[in-house]
Amino acid sequence: MCLAIPVRVTELLEGEMARVTLDGVRKEISLALVDDVKPGDYVILHVGYALNKIDPAEAERTLALLAEAGRVEGLSP
């Protein structure tokens, strides 16, 4: 099973890349599939690629549900 999760964009990088964070973990991802992303936006991340932007309230609800379900330890919106 594959899982795509919301992450918050913290910095735009060169070459359609961005730095994102989730519960203190930082990662560089590709934005090649998504337009008009800026720092502070949430995107759905799957295997290193942002698939689309997501509303911040929806991202926080999803992260809270994942944490509650125990699917990912230590998650906090």
Image (cartoon, rainbow, N blue to C red):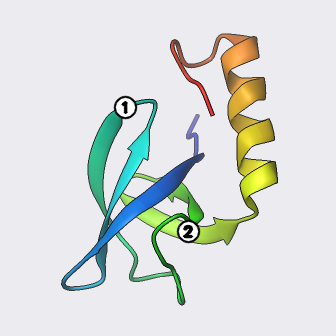
Task: Check the picture and name the quadrant holding the N terminus.
Answer: top right
The image quadrant of residue 56 is: bottom right
Residue 50 located left or right of residue 44: left
- Measured as percent of width and height from the top left, residue 65 is found at 78, 26
The kind of residue on which mark 2 rests is Leu
Q: Which mark is residue 77?
A: none
Q: Residue at x 76, y 63 (%)?
A: 55
Residue type at mark 1: give it.
Answer: Gly
Query: What residue sits right under mark 2 in the picture?
Result: 51
Camera-side mark, 1 or 2 = 1
SS at badge 2? strand
Location of the C terminus by quadrant is top right
Q: Along the line of sight, which residue is nearer the eye, 19 or 48?
A: 19
Q: Which residue is mark 1?
A: 24
Q: Is residue 13 above or below residue 15?
A: above
Q: Residue at x 45, y 30 (%)?
A: 23
The residue at 80%/51% (across/down) is 57
Q: Nearer the viewer, residue 5 or 25?
A: 25
Q: Is residue 63 left or right of residue 58?
A: left
Q: Report x, y in % for residue 68.
A: 75, 14
Residue 46, compared with residue 70, is above or below; it is below
